[in-house]
Amino acid sequence: MNKRSDYLSWDEYFMGVALLSALRSKDPNTQVGACIINEQKKIVGIGYNGLPIGCDDDDFPWDREGEFLETKYPYVCHAELNATLNKISADLDKGIVYVTLFPCNECAKVLIQSGIQEVIYLSNKYPDSDSVQAARKMFDSAGVEYRALEGYRPSIALNFSA
């Protein structure tokens, strides 16, 4: 008997974890997940975009537009930040982050400072935004590689009754 041929690639597996993490986000507009792995292909951190621990999701706004303090932007921690803070390893040096949305400039700084060497992303919805342009500039300067996930299957089904 031969081994299965339809198993997940490493990229599909780790991006799948990032996508599953994104489903924890309470954000009604944008759900982002991140999964950090080390050189041994072991998961060392996961996260999703949400409010800081102790802040009630019902007490803060989720709006994208309006007065700054009436939007989600000053309050929400991004998935990459949470994955970095939730790490189980003391050292993320030479790690890879799988993230469902290309990182903003603030997350790029966190990833670079933590030693991440590669960013693999699923979507880049805002490629011309100042934030993404700044992130790319910093990644290029720091030698952090980044690439879009390619050649992946369109969906993965999870069956809880298996």
Image (spheres, rainbow, N blue to C red):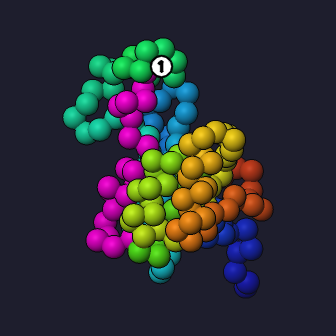
Give the main secondary structure, helix, strand or loop, of the magenta stretch.
Answer: loop
Residue at 57%, 49% (x, y): give it: 134
Q: Residue furthest bottom?
A: 1
Was residue 85 drawn as part of the magenta stretch in this picture? yes
Q: Work out whether residue 76 or residue 158 is closer to the camera in this orientation and state it.
A: 76
Residue at 37%, 58% (x, y): give it: 84
Was residue 55 drawn as part of the magenta stretch in this picture? no
Judge left or right: residue 145 versus residue 142.
Answer: right
Q: Is residue 54 above or below residue 109?
A: above
Q: Work out whether residue 83 or residue 107 is closer to the camera in this orientation and state it.
A: 107
Q: Amino acid at mark 1?
A: Asp
Looking at the picture, how far across and down is residue 67, in whole percent?
43, 15
Which residues make up the magenta segment?
A: 71-92
Q: Is residue 7 above or below residue 72?
A: below
Is residue 7 visible in this depiction of the protein? yes
Looking at the picture, how far across and down is residue 117, in whole percent?
52, 71
Q: Is residue 45 above or below residue 51?
A: below
